Amino acid sequence: MPRSRSEPQAASSAPSWRSSRGLRARLPGDERILEALGTLYTEAGRYEDGLAVDLELQARRPGDPHVLYNLACSYALTGDTPRALDTLEDAVRQGYRDFLWMARDRDLKALRDEPRFRLLLAAAGLSV
């Protein structure tokens, strides 16, 4: 399931991401910890760190539509619109279907005026 992200909250999230980073060191194979760390980095406004985690998850689960969706969000948040759109389209090809969430997800705000983003939503019967 795609993670729900919000505006940066660095101060309130700092202890949580430090704890998750410690758990990651102790349990490097646990993907749930990676998912939590990616979410916490993003919520803290550490978009490049969130992107790095999402890339690691994508390497571990290359066809997972939710991993691809979160990776597309990270690309959008770091300003890489072409990769964000490519990855979002790949997520849909792999089975991502929560188009209502996609239409309102703040992480994808930078894509809202892009024709390719609008086409994805139009194919699902939605508009921005």
Image (cartoon, rainbow, N blue to C red):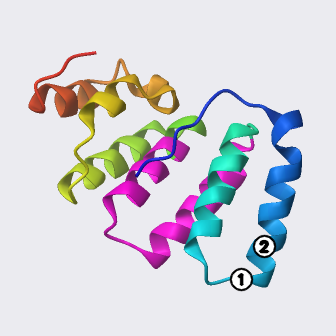
Quadrant assignment for the C terminus: top left
How many dots with numbers?
Answer: 2
Where residue 42 sits: x, y (%)? 66, 43
Where residue 1 sits: x, y (%)? 40, 52
Q: Name the element at disc 2.
A: helix
Left or right of 20 in this view: 114? left
Which residue, given by chain and number where applicable, does mark 2 sit on?
23
Is the residue marked by circle 2 packed among few (<14), some (14-19), or many (20+) residues within 10 Å?
some
Where residue 83 sits: x, y (%)? 42, 47
Which residue, given by chain and number where applicable, does mark 1 sit on?
27
Name the residue rendered at 55%, 45% in the picture. 74
Name the residue rendered at 62%, 62% in the picture. 53
Query: Of the residues shown, which amino acid type is indicated by label 1?
Result: Leu
Is the residue marked by circle 1 packed among few (<14), some (14-19), or many (20+) residues within 10 Å?
few
Identify the mark at residue 117; answer none if there is no mark.
Answer: none
The answer to whether residue 17 is above or below residue 5 is: below
Query: Of the residues shown, which amino acid type is indicated by label 2?
Result: Leu
The answer to whether residue 59 is above or below residue 47 is: below
Name the residue rendered at 74%, 74% in the picture. 24
Residue 11 among those drawn in magenta: no
Where residue 113 sits: x, y (%)? 35, 17
Left or right of 24 in this view: 62? left
Q: Are marks 1 and 2 in contact (CB under 8 Å)?
A: yes
Res. 68 image quadrant = bottom left
Left or right of 75 in this view: 97? left
Q: Nearer the viewer, residue 3 or 119?
A: 3
**Which span of residues is magenta-colored?**
46-74
Q: Main secondary structure of the magenta part?
A: helix
Q: Name the element at disc 1.
A: loop
Left or right of 122 in this view: 17? right
Name the residue rendered at 33%, 46% in the picture. 88
